[in-house]
Amino acid sequence: MSVKYTIGLDYGTNSVRALIVNVANGAEVAAAVWTYAHGTQGVILARDPNLARQHPADYLQGAEITIQQTLASAKKNVRGFKSEQVIGIGVDTTGSTPLPVDATGQPLAFQKKFANHPAAMAWLWKDHTGVSEAAEITALAAKIRPQYLAKCGGTYSSEWFWSKILKCLRTAPEVFNAAHSWIELADFVPAALSGTEHPDKFIAGVCAAGHKAMWNAKWGGYPDAEFLAKLNPKLASLRSRLTTRVYSIDKSVGGLTAAWAKKTGLSAGIPIAVGAFDAHLGAVGSGVAPGTLVKIIGTSTCDIAIASNTKKLADVPGLCGIVDGSVLPGNFGLEAGQSAVGDLFNWLVNYIEPGAPISRSASRKTKTSRSEDRLSATHEDLSVAALKLKPGESGLLALDWNNGNRTILVDQRLTGLLIGQTLYTTPAEIYRALIEATAFGALTIINRFEEYGVKISSVVNCGGIAEKSDLTMQIYADVTGRPMKVSRSAQTCALGSAIAASVVAGAHKNYAAAQKAMTGLKPKVYKPNPAAHKTYKEIYVLYKELHDAFGTQTWNGNLFGVMKKLIEIRGQVRK
Amino acid sequence: MSVKYTIGLDYGTNSVRALIVNVANGAEVAAAVWTYAHGTQGVILARDPNLARQHPADYLQGAEITIQQTLASAKKNVRGFKSEQVIGIGVDTTGSTPLPVDATGQPLAFQKKFANHPAAMAWLWKDHTGVSEAAEITALAAKIRPQYLAKCGGTYSSEWFWSKILKCLRTAPEVFNAAHSWIELADFVPAALSGTEHPDKFIAGVCAAGHKAMWNAKWGGYPDAEFLAKLNPKLASLRSRLTTRVYSIDKSVGGLTAAWAKKTGLSAGIPIAVGAFDAHLGAVGSGVAPGTLVKIIGTSTCDIAIASNTKKLADVPGLCGIVDGSVLPGNFGLEAGQSAVGDLFNWLVNYIEPGAPISRSASRKTKTSRSEDRLSATHEDLSVAALKLKPGESGLLALDWNNGNRTILVDQRLTGLLIGQTLYTTPAEIYRALIEATAFGALTIINRFEEYGVKISSVVNCGGIAEKSDLTMQIYADVTGRPMKVSRSAQTCALGSAIAASVVAGAHKNYAAAQKAMTGLKPKVYKPNPAAHKTYKEIYVLYKELHDAFGTQTWNGNLFGVMKKLIEIRGQVRK
């Protein structure tokens, strides 16, 4: 019997990736990446820093291009490879990234009239324009439907489905009124590939619906009409046009259409798995299981854990989602996250753009020698310099909130903070402080899981930063005091999608069997350095103080000691 | 009768300047500047960011070079100019900048043995190595000599005379023990020029002694021996070797020596005025009078006001000095200041060193176009971009404490803070936020003066930043809600020294007459923009909240609203 493969399609913030995986052993035999054509690196921006959109045409063009390329590449890489050996497709995407569609299920943006209308685009996960709408939804739910909030950390986010749709209704009624319905990107792509876009056939994934749209089987699906009507009667009406077919990723939405088969060279009819969010399928591709926290570290970080649905689970405050079946069938999927991680480091490199003097000694140079220096510092330059610094040596401490805080505060109306600067503070010191800030944020999330009975016995990291940045991984180990493991695959999200495809195609009898065959860890484990951990424990106390002082209404106190303690630690470390 | 001139010598942080001024009308006919030869731009640094020293050889070499050059220049600029027309010399310097001297009054650093010993150098004003010594002196005085603290804002600073000497005693006893005495740079230069270095002849200025060494005629001069002995018996012994001749700037320390006359081409015997700090003579050169606040804005800012000594004056908490006769005879001199102003802006440009994308729109460019961009942003680039921003538009707020806080907190163990960063924050926005931070610091000082009965009816600015930065002056006007005037002279410190020389040389009967003849304002006055002032009033509430939360032990509260209010203001302004 010939080797079987599946394709994972992974829709990220800037680009889409296709990955062809051997279902027997997880070998990744070919991959292709395509950056979305619209906007700045695939993201349509505006003067309002809260706005981030994508053009849905990019999603279909991206599927076509990357599937073609990856098949061509597999033919080069694997002797005798044939497209017919691909037995299924899985899809993961960013989210909540909803887009308005017409009565046939086609994106409004495909109509000439709306082709350039920002509100008719896909509202990318990091679009925060619906901040006040999120607050309104939260306030209403707190008053009349507290159960809705209990499953999403107590706060409904501006990043999510209903906030964005309500914002559109209020600020671009011409788009809202023209839309028959709104669907998630994670559901749009499987529907398009299988020709099930029409509302009569359309299927949604429980991952997006449960985590972002307050869908829950226990209360009959999406939020009830009475609740939605109090926000706006048009939302209640929209509810009736949303699908009632909401499934886990062990289901298929249908088979690949003949048109897509022709375009791509794949076999018509191969099953397309129900779509899910990148982080959730990334967790699957990293071997997520009860007790294992998977951190998918990219522009932002998603933290995924699961817990068997046979036992009762407390509602964990600040966790952005607890949804039965959202990651793997039979388990509660628990999602937490940090709104800016790689984006935070990119901000320093791309916006603040340090020139030459990235380390303390280099920065003592006078201006006159500048012409010999390089144009701008890269992540690599800054990492090399930051790696030479000891914990606490810079005296800096940052909050990782440049893009708000998703967990545990669930508050977009937060911003970055940097404290401890002297007249000699260098970009490398700031770079390290930003990495440390995300590590402190990660620790805060782990602590929250454990405080509510979700024991974390193993942390598996994946994503570009986990792959590439020894500095980040070591800081995470030192800050959390836990070994940091790294997933074997560099493309766990796409791998997770390929695993989903392998399950719906029947190559494995269930996810446990598929994960056993197709996932693994890298041999290198980052172990915490006890001395560094000791210093970071001291600094974490200060981080938590700032976190609570700026992030909660219940904190009360004085911050007189914070700068002084940082100076004291700096002095001890430099000795 | 021929035109008479005086020379003002102005010893700054990085360089010394000589200025030749016409005593009849204040015309500045020639100037010369020389950057100190030792260290980085004249400052000897170390890994400890608190350390900043200077080599005293630079002071004498600087006097020789700049006097020669300025005389040569005057001969070119003024037809028939003769060195004999120079009738006196005045000297201003940074401070507290004490240096150890031997039994003949010569700097220890002039001995081969100590030529490279950091502790034998001059301890530059911004050297903060004596932080714990300052705390110790403060604690002791609070306990047994509260009157000492009442005149220096309640806290003795690490920047000052006794903190530095006690630090030397503790950490470099070989230097302390070899020193016969310690003198201020402001007294060293006049003594050297007049050959009065020897302890038998040596004269000190009341400005340095009163503001930095707790000298006060009311309690018999320097702190009493019992007090000093409790810090260390060797300090009590040192007290007996400090001069009892402590005078205001209406006195001369002696005449120019024949050796110096020969070296420079000046006439031997012309009077040298008692030395004072740069800011104090800068205030004189800016026309300081009761009701006028003079802000000398350079790497740091000094604020100088005076109040007639015929009326009782409250002790103003947090003011770094109230000394009878320290600015002008017959008046209390009141000194406040900000530890980093130009240094704060320089930090961003020289250390963080932004490359190309200095404005929001430019920063949207992708990485690929970077090679066309300039190497690094300058103050001018950043100012142009920052000038386009409206108050509150960036959402940023900074504390101006990268070098500690001199007034009103008098606390070196404070650091910088920046809040409000998004993923799109640009260097120009940070640059503007840093300028605004210094403006908020300036407002805090003005408020403190007025709270204690020192009415400020006029603000006159001088120094490089007041001269060059329209952006800074307009922000200061908008933040404080007061017109910002600028001194006519670009060199008010050197001009003030030249005025002192004119008084001791008898060209004017007193300072009022000399100031009337020799000082003036520029025609351009920066008037507050009411809309900008309104926004800044809102932001100042947040600044003051952060200031008090991190800077005082008495504040108690919660900062949950700070980021949100900044976002709200940003949203309003961007509308």
Image (cartoon, coloured by chain):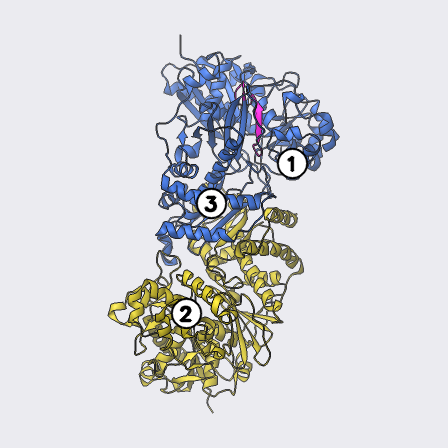
Chain colours: A blue, B yellow
Magenta stretch, main secondary structure class: loop
Q: Chain of mark 1?
A: A
Decide: is B535 above or below B247: above
Q: Nearer the viewer, mark 3 or mark 2?
A: 2
Judge by depth and name the residue closer to the eye, A263 or B202: B202
Q: Residue at x 38, y 61 (%)?
A: B51
Q: Residue A48's spot in the image, x, y percent?
A: 60, 43
Amino acid under disc 2? Phe
Q: Which residue is mark 3?
A: A348
Identify the chain of the residue marked 2, using the numbered disc in the image. Answer: B
Nearer to us in this view, A22 or A280: A280
Specify the label residue B161 is tagged with.
Answer: 2
Q: Residue at x 65, y 28 (%)?
A: A147
Disc with the residue nearer the chain's start (1 vs 3): 1
* Same chain, labels 1 and 3: yes
Residue B42 makes an appearance in the image? no
Q: Which residues are magenta?
A: A317-331
